[in-house]
Amino acid sequence: MPKLINLLNENRMTLMVALPENDPELAEAAVRGGADALQLHVNVSHFKTFYEEKKSLKQILENTVIPVGIVPGLDVTADKDEMEEMKKIGFDFFNMDMEKVPAFMMELKGISRVLALNERYTLDKLMASDHKADALDAAIISASGKGKDLVVGDLHTMEIVRFLEGDPIMPASFTAECRLCSSIVCPIQASLRSASRSLNTAAWA
């Protein structure tokens, strides 16, 4: 079983850091700051294609002992050959929007499948889906709520998702300061760790 899923199953709380750039120095800082796992990106926002980012991705993977995953895109995604190459160089998991993940990705062997719920995903849709995910990224807070306090209602919704699914759930902090502060792990992340312990989940920073 890939390392991330073992980590999620064994730990009451796992801190995962999504890097704002595929930068080896940021990855090193995140690990020093206490990250339990890292997530890198290609084909989204300011991130370039896999082959354009490959040198930095490999350097991070070669110098990191904790699980490292990849967001392979959103509207434009890595193709099958690129995903196989990502497995080969050492990525432990991929994270894709549940509504946009290509069918071939769900058939990949030897890499964990993390699927992201968005704020439009209803509980009815979740109950009706046969997603075959190893873990869920609970990105269920709307854009207007990003950067704001995590409230009891958010935790309650995540707890319901956890109850329905049984898979590890990863709530996000959605806080730019968390991603950019010099120590990587900041007080906002620490409070998220504390608030989320009861869910037996991972928290994104």
Image (spheres, helix red, strand yellow):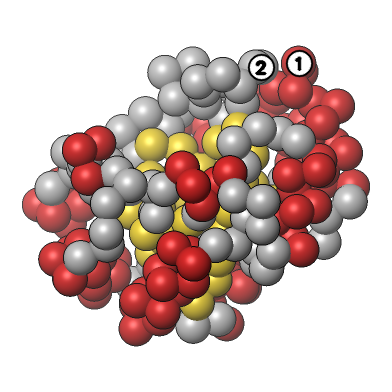
- Badge 1 element: helix
Q: Which quarter of the figure has residue 103?
A: top left
How many numbered discs? Answer: 2
- Badge 2 element: loop
49 above or below 167? above
Which residue matches tag 2? 49
At label 1, the amino acid type is Glu
At label 2, the amino acid type is Thr
At 49% from the left edge and 16% from the top edge, which residue is drawn? Answer: 76
22 above or below 194? above
Q: Are marks 1 and 2 in contact (CB under 8 Å)?
A: yes
Q: Is residue 192 among the parts visible in the rendering?
A: yes
Residues at marks 1 and 2, CA–CA distance in whole angstroms:
5 Å
Task: Give left or right: position of 122 versus 203.
Answer: left
**Residue situated in front as seen by the camera: 69 or 154:** 154
At 49% from the left edge and 67% from the top edge, which residue is drawn? Answer: 187
Q: Could you tell me residue 80's position as x and y percent?
A: 63, 25
What is the number of the mark on residue 19?
A: none
Q: Could you tell me residue 152's position as x and y percent?
A: 17, 71
Which residue matches tag 1? 52
Task: Give left or right: position of 110 versus 202.
Answer: right
Q: Could you tell me residue 188's position as x and y percent?
A: 44, 63
At 81% from the left edge and 41% from the top edge, which residue is drawn? Answer: 24
9 above or below 143? below
**Residue situated in front as seen by the camera: 151 or 90:** 151
160 above or below 44? below
Pick the quarter of the image with the N terminus: bottom right
At 20% from the left edge and 52% from the top edge, which residue is drawn? Answer: 126
